[in-house]
Structures are given as C-alpha cells and as structure tokens.
Image (tube, rainbow, N blue to C red):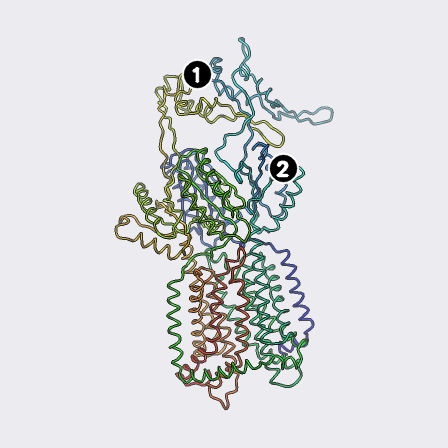
C-alpha cells in the first residue's frame, strides 16, 4: 500500500490530526516567550578590576598584564583586550562561538584566582558573562517637587523593588540615582585640638558606643535566653551625648567638639529625567524570560503600588523594550495578513474558483500554526527572527500548495475514473517533483547551522523557522491538499479552473517566441550580456552594511566632557543638551545618567549617557532626528563630545566589545607616538563624508593632587606617613564610623572636618595635624602638595599596546565609508613604518559575517547541485538548472541598487534563499519535460509544451510569493526594517524567475542536448 492510498483510507483521522496539531500550535503561540532577540550567548566574558588609585603605568604592568596572561591560557580564548586607567581596568575575553560560556566564565575566574598570590593586596575583581540580559528591558523614573532624593530612593528600594522582583522572569531590579541618607559628624578642629583629641578618637568612641551583639546564652526557669548587649543609637541626641573622654578633669561629649546632623552620602553621579532630578529603577530579565509578560506584570504591580506611593511622586516610563517587540510583532502580523490576502487574490484571479482558493486559505495558516508548535517543542521564543521567518515563508508555503492544486486539477481534466482515486493518483505522481522542489529550498538552510559570529546568533533562528515552515508545508501540500480536494472539489470545479482566453493567448505567444529562440539560441546570450553588465554595475554601486538600519523609536546619546571636568560643570553643559532635547518635537521623554551608564555601571564623573525615547509614528525618521540633535549639540554646546547609537546597534556592539562601526586600531610600543598618531588619524577621518562622532581613543583620567610626605620631617614631628595618610583620609573623605538601623535600612555615621576646611588645595596645604605628643602643625610643613595632570588610559589587544580611533556613520553605507577610511590611512607616509593598524568595530563583524555567508552560499549551491543529480541522474540537466538559478542573483543586485538598499547580512540571507526558490521552479519545469511522452514530437516541441503546461502554476507561484513578501519589502512599522532587505532580495530574484524558468532554461537544456546528442534530458 502506497502512502497516498493509506492517506485515502485514513483521510478523516489525518485531517483531524493535522487540525489538532495546528490548534495546539495556536495555543502554544499564546504561551511562548516573546522577546526582541533570539536566545543567544555571546562568547564574551568581561572582567572589571578595581585597585584604588594605583597609577596607570604601574597598574598596567603589575596588575592588568598578569591578569591578561592568565585568562589568555583558558581553552577556547580567541582574543583578549584590556583598558587600564588610574585605579581600574577592564579585560574583555572573547571566546570561540561554540564554547560553553558558563564553563568559560568559571575557568576565567579560576585563572584569575590563581594569580592573586602575585598581585598586590586590596584588589577587587568582578567577572560577568555578557548576554542581552545585562541590559534592562524596562525603565521608570521617580520625580517629585516636594520629596527629597533620599525619600525617592527609599521608595524605589523598599517599596517598588521588592514587589517587582516577584514578577516571573525578572532577574533583578536596579536603582540608580537619588541620595543615600547619612548622619554626619562635622568636627570643629580647633575645639578638638583644645581637648587634645583627634578624629580617630571620635571614630573609635562613636563606633564603640553603637553596639548590638550576642554575648552568650543563659538557662533559667526552664528556658534558654539569648543575652544581647544593645547600646544602639536611637536618635541624634544620643549620638551627641557620646562620651569621647572622661577623667578627673571632667567628661568630653561629642556635642562639645562637633555638630551632628542628617545629611547624604557624597555623590559623584547624577541622574535625572526630563530635566528633573530623579531616581531611576530598571528591570532586568532572566535568560529566556518573556519580555512582554514581564512588562505587563510590572505595569499591573505598579498600578497596585499607587496605593502606597505618595501622590506627589510621579512614576514615568522612559524605556520599554516590549514596545519595539510588540511593534515588530504587529508589523509582521500585518505582513502575514496582507501577504496572505494578496496571495489569495492572485489564486482567485488565476483559478477563478472559490473552493480551490479556500484550500489555500485553510492550509497556509495550518502550516504556520504547526510551525509554531514545533518551535515551542524546540524551546524557542517568538522574536523578530522567528516571526520574520514565518512571514518570509508565506510565499513559499503558498508555492507548494499552488503547484499541488494545479497539478491535481490538470490531471482531473485529462483522466477518467473514480474522483477520489484520480486525486490521489495525481498526488502520488507529483510526489517526487514536490519533494525535490521542497528539498531544494530546505537544503539551503543546512549550512546555516554551522554559522558562527553574530550572524549565526541571529539567523539560525530565522533559518530554522523557515526550514520548519517548508517541511510542514510539504507535508500539508502532499497529504492535506489532496484530502481537502477529495471533500471539496467536484468535476465542474476542474472545468471552471481551466484557463480562459488570456491563457490561450499567452500560450500562443509563448509558442511563437520559443520557436524563434530555440532555432536561434544565440539570442539568449545577447540578452543575458546586457543583463549581466547591469548586474555588475549594480553590484559596484550597492552599499554594504552589517545589520539593517532600524527605526526602534529611541536611541542612546553617549557624552564625555574634557577629562577632569567637575561633576557640576559637566551637569551645566548637559543642561544645555537637555534644552535641545526639550525643543525637539519628536522627543517624548528622556533619562540621563552622569557618572553611570545605561547598564548601571559606574563611569568617570565627566561621562555618561542619555536614553531618548521618541513619540510614536507617524513622525520623522530616527536618522533625521539623530542628525538634527547632533548638529545642534556640536554647534551650540562646545566642550562636550557626543556619540549617538541606535539601541540594538549599541547593545550588539557592547556585547561584542566595540559598539562603533569604525574602529582603527593603531599598534606600537611607543605610547607617546600612538597618541600623536591617534589625534592625526582622528583629524583625517573626520573629513571623510559620512563619518561622525569621531573619537581619538585618548582617554585621560582626571587631574590629581599628589601629596608626597617627607618621611624625615614627619618623623621629627612624631608621625609616620601611614598616620598622616589616615588623618588625611578621615578629614577629606570622612570615616564611616558605624551604621545605625533605621527601619529597613542601615544609615551610615560619617565623621569629617567642615567643608570650608577642605574646599581647595590651599585648605589641604593648611590642614592641621596633631601628633602623638599633642602638638599641632600644618600638613605643608612635612609634605609637598602638587597638582598632576591626568594620565592616559592604556589599551592593549592580545598583549600588544594600541589606541583605537573610533567613529560612527551617518548618511552612507558602511562598506564604502570604511574603504575611504582605509584609502586615507594607506596614503604614503601617513603612518611610520614601525606602526601598523587593523580595522575592527562592527565593520570587522560585518566582514566575518560576509565570509561566513559566502561559505554558506557556496555550500548551498553545491548541496542543490547534488540534489539535482540525485533527482535526475543527469549532469547536463543539473548544470542547466544551476546556471538558470545563478542568473537570478544578478537580479538581486539590481533590485538592491534600484531600491537603495545596502547589502547587509539580511540581504545576503535573501540572496541565498533565492537560489533554492528558483531551483524549485526549475525542478517543476524539468519534471514536466521528462514526464511528457517522447513519441511523435521533437525535444524542442517537448520543451515548449512543458513551458505551456507549467506557465500558469509558475505565474501563480511567482506572483503569489511576490505579493506575500511585498508587505515586508515595504518595511512599514517599527522593527520591520530588519527583514526588509531579505524581502527585497527575494522579490528581486522572483521578478526574473518566470522568464528564466520558461525561456532561459529550455535554451540551456536544448544547447546541452545538442552538445551531448542525448534525448533523455
């Protein structure tokens, strides 16, 4: 019993099983995780090193280099990159993409721990694995005109954070900004000295007076009691009555020498939102979390929290990643609906039969729903790639269904017998061509499984989704379409679906044209040569990029003022930037971090970022808004460097270590020479059209005031350098002597000198010290105090010293811009012979991706060629079909050029897919040609007859696929731009698919037939 016969016997159970499977897919889609990106693990581990205020040069040699060498020995490490500044360093460790990153992170930690014995003491390490979850998915601000920043921070920490942390999928809730409450003891140095006391005495007394400690246990009256010594401070008056000294001369209380007040911890960061000082709280999701579900649940929780949040506190949303996800989902959903509707309209026009059209209307959603169920089994999420893959596959699904319907109708018209048996005989007859054509498209996705880099991380999900769609559509076209036809179709439907006068006219025109061309096959090269020339011209003039530019509804503005600029001055300059944002009509809201980054990491006080959210569509494009804001800031706010990035571009860049498209890495052992060349290079590329936001890579730490204690002079005064340093720290930074519990939090108690005594360098020079024998003297008597300019950060790549000059691109494609940069750098004499450069950044990622995709393309072509040989056992047929298919690639470049679309990795995916799509049509044509009777007609006549027979189904599948992809090619809506180049590339190939299959392929077959003198082509 054949499978079609078995299917005919069990038609009810098969249709029910397929319907149940599709229904399960619908329910699975409702519960699947929804996220922006596919789940991916970037092969990067980030190591942050904190070492106090260690000088740059010493830290690079004593700390950073040993750590680099240690992690370089971890298996699978591909690249080690470091940046060392005063007192801190970060080391970026990149691994191969097939490495288990959880194990890699543990091995990095182990390698660092093994070096600790040879490193100075007091060094702190933070090792973390980089993935998209290190960035927030949701951000809110707390603003109040009446509440203090302490109160706002407490609301975020102790009311909001515990509630949001209970939401399923939330990893943590980070709180930025605000002020930390603190009790402050401001001593009067003169009174302190008059009593013969020091700040150390104050710290010890306060610390010893605020104690709660379990001191033992006592059994009494059949009970076990815990004995506590509790002398905690309850309020400021108790702190003031702390006894500093008691003797026969009396008692000295803290209030006698100091004032105690409530204050805030010294802050070297600043956070605001929409021009107001604010507290930000950011929600981070767990790997595999459902972003949309997290957002909805957090929104519900915040509504409930309004009951306990004071009414004078405003809670505003400044970032919501689910907005882009839902916008992308809506765009793809609209593409589904519009594409299917247009494709169905094509079927209705060609078939002129509602029942036949109804079969397609039923089976296409069934295929998509079944695909969702398979994706759910595989543990995948609904994201921009899986949804886009299904949208792009709609045309191919309809393709399978159309050719099966058309073949069944044609066979029903030309045979007699039982109706159901004839349907299944037609399905059985068409099994091999349908399987071969589906395999030709599915097989191109096999090499994609071996893709690495960012390309593989993104497009494995898309390719797997499309492969599943096509596999399911084959099964439904093979099994379900004949069964639906058995139940729905009647003999009159086959007569109604027969072509009319237009079909007859098209056949006659095709017959006459092909007779001329087959008699004069040189006509084809004469037509193809201008086509190839135009394609080469288009290739030369088509720009290239990495990922498509997307309008995500917001962007990030990174900024940096001159090294060493104070927090107050930086804030003043940023207020001018905020005025520009507030006067830009497209800006809906923004948040600003100074001394912090979007991910919550601490930076220098002179740098930080804005996150700027735009109003919903319709509005000006994101690129136009960014360019306008950039121009205003550059011309109206001198003294500040800015760098703008789209959100996804910035996230991917941060995950891969370099977010800028252009990165010129200059290598030399001479640090001063590198700095000079970096400035020269930055000036050079700044003049290249399209290059913006240029940075020379020279990062200076802020200026410092160094105090050099003379050991001899200090000894003569009765003090050691260590005692001097401790006194200076107590006076200038303050000493948190103890912590006092206040409800759910601990409040520090800091002791230091008045602000007016530590305001300037001169104040530091005159700082009064007290020796052990009680005499008092100024610091300048035993120490030299001198300002020191900031030291330059030291960067290294694979243990080689370098400086990276970076830039971004506006208004041009990446490929041509970087080529201009390379041309400028390669000018004779521009760089000395002992200095060399490499290009990194996103351009390097693009080149890696292109190399991978070219390899995939070649592998796909070879696999398809092998498949054609397997199907037809003819080298001549395989060569003819392969040549026909490759000509479609010329049309892809022409289409990209006409639509001004860059050749990105998305477009290259479409280029690879068009190979399988066109091959599918050539298989149908050649199968028809082989199945025609050989008696009584020549090979040329059989080729023409095969073209007539396949003309209508090829026209239907081509037009249906074009119209199904058209909504994606239009790129309507936020997030739709990601798949637009893929759709344009496929449509461009589909435009020439019909003439290639019906005109060029027969000529290739005829020519090869004459060369080999065989009739079995």
Q: Is residue 744 left or right of residue 585?
A: right
Which of 664 and 272 lies nearest the eye of the viewer? Answer: 272
Q: Residues within 10 Å of mark 2 (few under 14, many from 20)?
A: some
Above or below, 760 relative to 13:
above
Above or below, 265 relative to 986:
above
- Residue 387: mark in rendering: none
The residues tagged by marks 1 and 2 sit, at their Cα atoms, a distance apart of 49 Å
Q: Residues within 10 Å of mark 1 (few under 14, many from 20)?
A: few
Total numbered circles? 2
Quarter of the image with the N terminus is bottom right
Image location of residue 868, percent across then percent down: 48, 75
Q: Nearer the viewer, mark 1 or mark 2?
A: 2
Q: For numbered disc 2, what is the local secondary structure? A: helix
Which of 528 and 408 lies nearest the eye of the viewer? Answer: 528
Above or below, 454 relative to 312:
below
Farthest right residue?
221
For residue 123, say whether it is visible: yes
Image location of residue 399, percent across then percent down: 55, 71
Above or below, 805 relative to 969:
above
Q: Is residue 122 left or right of residue 499?
A: left
Image location of residue 245, percent across then percent down: 53, 14
Which numbered disc, 1 or 2, marks the residue that appears first in the sequence?
2
Q: Residue at x 51, y 73 (%)?
A: 920
Image location of residue 403, percent across then percent down: 56, 75
Q: For numbered disc 1, what is the local secondary structure? A: loop
- Residue 159: mark in rendering: 2
Q: Is residue 816 left or right of residue 44?
A: left
The residue identified by callout 1 is: 772
């Amino acid at each position: 019993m054949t499978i079609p016969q078995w299917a005919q016997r069990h038609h009810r159970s098969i249709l029910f099983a397929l319907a149940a499977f599709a229904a399960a897919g619908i329910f699975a889609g409702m519960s699947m995780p929804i996220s922006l990106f596919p789940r991916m693990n970037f092969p990067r581990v980030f190591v942050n090193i904190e070492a106090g205020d260690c000088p740059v040069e010493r830290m690079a040699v004593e700390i950073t280099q040993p750590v680099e060498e240690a992690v370089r020995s971890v298996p699978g490490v591909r690249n080690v990159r470091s940046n060392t500044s005063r007192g801190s360093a970060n080391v970026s460790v990149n691994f191969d993409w097939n490495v288990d990153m959880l194990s890699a992170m543990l091995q990095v930690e182990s390698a660092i721990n093994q070096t600790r014995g040879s490193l100075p003491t007091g060094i702190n390490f933070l090792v973390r694995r980089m993935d998209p979850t290190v960035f927030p998915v949701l951000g809110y601000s707390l603003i109040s005109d009446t509440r203090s920043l302490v109160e706002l921070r407490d609301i975020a920490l102790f009311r909001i954070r515990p509630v949001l942390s209970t939401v399923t999928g939330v990893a943590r809730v980070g709180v930025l900004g605000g002020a930390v409450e603190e009790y402050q003891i401001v001593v009067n140095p003169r009174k302190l000295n008059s009593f013969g006391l020091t700040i150390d005495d104050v710290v010890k007394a306060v610390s010893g007076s605020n104690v709660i400690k379990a001191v033992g246990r006592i059994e009494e009256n059949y009970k076990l009691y815990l004995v506590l010594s509790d002398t905690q401070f309850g309020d400021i008056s108790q702190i003031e009555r702390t006894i500093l000294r008691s003797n026969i001369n009396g008692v000295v209380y803290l209030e006698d020498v100091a004032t105690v007040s409530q204050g805030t911890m010294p802050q070297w960061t600043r956070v605001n939102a929409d021009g107001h000082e604010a507290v930000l709280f950011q929600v981070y999701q767990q790997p595999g979390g459902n972003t949309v579900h997290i957002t909805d649940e957090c929104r519900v929780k915040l509504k409930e929290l309004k009951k306990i949040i004071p009414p004078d506190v405003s809670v505003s949303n400044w970032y919501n990643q689910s907005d882009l996800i839902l916008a992308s989902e809506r765009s793809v959903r609209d593409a589904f609906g519009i594409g299917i509707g247009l494709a169905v309209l094509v079927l209705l026009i060609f078939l002129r039969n509602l029942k036949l059209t109804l079969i397609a209307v039923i089976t296409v959603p069934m295929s998509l729903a079944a695909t969702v169920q398979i994706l759910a089994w595989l543990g995948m999420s609904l994201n921009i790639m899986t949804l886009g893959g299904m949208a792009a596959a709609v045309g191919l699904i309809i393709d399978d269904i159309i050719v099966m319907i058309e073949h069944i109708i044609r066979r029903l018209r030309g045979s007699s017998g039982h109706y159901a048996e004839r349907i299944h005989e037609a399905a059985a007859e068409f099994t091999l061509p349908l399987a071969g054509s589906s395999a030709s498209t599915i097989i191109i996705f096999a090499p994609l499984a071996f893709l690495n880099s960012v390309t593989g991380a993104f497009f494995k999900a898309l390719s797997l989704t499309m492969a599943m769609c096509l596999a399911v559509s084959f099964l439904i076209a093979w099994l379900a379409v004949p069964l639906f036809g058995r139940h729905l179709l009647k003999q009159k439907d086959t007569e109604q679906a027969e072509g009319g006068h237009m079909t007859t006219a098209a056949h006659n025109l095709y017959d006459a044209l092909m007779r001329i061309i087959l008699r004069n096959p040189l006509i084809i090269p004469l037509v193809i040569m201008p086509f190839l020339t135009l394609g080469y011209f288009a290739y030369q003039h088509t720009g290239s990029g990495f990922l498509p530019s997307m309008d995500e509804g917001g962007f990030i503005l990174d900024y940096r003022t001159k090294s060493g600029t104070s927090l107050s001055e930086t804030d003043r300059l940023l207020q001018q930037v905020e005025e520009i944002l507030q006067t830009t009509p497209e800006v809906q809201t923004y948040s600003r971090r100074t001394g912090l980054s979007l991910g919550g990491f601490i930076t220098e006080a002179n740098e930080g970022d804005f996150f700027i959210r735009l109003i919903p569509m319709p509005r000006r494009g994101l690129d136009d808004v960014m360019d306008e804001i950039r121009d205003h800031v550059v011309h109206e706010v001198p003294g500040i460097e800015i760098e703008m990035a789209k959100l996804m571009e910035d996230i991917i860049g941060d995950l891969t270590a370099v977010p800028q498209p252009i990165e010129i890495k200059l290598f030399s052992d001479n640090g001063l020479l590198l700095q000079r060349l970096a400035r020269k290079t930055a000036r050079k590329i700044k003049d290249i059209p399209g290059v913006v936001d240029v940075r020379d890579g020279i990062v200076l730490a802020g200026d410092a005031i160094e105090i050099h204690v003379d050991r001899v002079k200090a000894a003569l005064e009765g003090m050691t350098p260590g005692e001097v340093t401790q006194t200076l720290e107590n006076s200038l930074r303050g000493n948190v002597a103890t912590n006092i519990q206040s409800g759910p939090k601990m409040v520090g108690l800091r002791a230091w000198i008045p602000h007016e005594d530590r305001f300037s360098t001169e104040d530091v020079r005159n700082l009064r010290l007290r020796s052990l024998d009680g005499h008092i003297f100024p610091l300048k008597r035993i120490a030299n105090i001198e300002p020191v300019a900031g030291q330059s950060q030291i960067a290294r790549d694979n243990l080689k010293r370098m400086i990276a000059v970076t830039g971004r691109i506006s208004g041009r494609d990446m490929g041509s811009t970087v080529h201009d940069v390379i041309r400028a750098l390669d000018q004779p004499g521009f760089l000395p012979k002992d200095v060399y450069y490499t290009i990194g950044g996103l351009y390097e990622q693009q080149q890696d991706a292109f190399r991978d995709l070219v390899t995939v393309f070649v592998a796909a072509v070879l696999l398809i060629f092998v498949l054609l040989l397997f199907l037809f056992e003819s080298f001549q047929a395989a060569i003819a079909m392969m040549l026909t298919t490759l000509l479609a690639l010329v049309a892809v470049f022409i289409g990209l050029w006409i639509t001004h679309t860059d050749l990105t990795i998305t477009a290259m995916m479409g280029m690879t897919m068009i190979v399988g799509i066109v091959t599918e049509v050539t298989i149908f044509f050649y199968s028809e040609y082989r199945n025609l009777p050989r008696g009584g007609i020549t090979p040329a006549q059989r080729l023409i007859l095969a073209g007539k027979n396949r003309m209508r189904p090829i026209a239907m599948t081509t037009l249906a696929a074009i119209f199904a992809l058209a909504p994606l090619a239009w790129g309507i809506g936020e997030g739709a731009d990601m798949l637009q180049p893929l759709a344009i590339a496929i449509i461009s190939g589909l435009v020439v698919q019909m003439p290639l299959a019906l005109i060029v392929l027969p000529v290739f077959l005829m020519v090869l037939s004459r060369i080999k003198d065989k009739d079995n082509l």
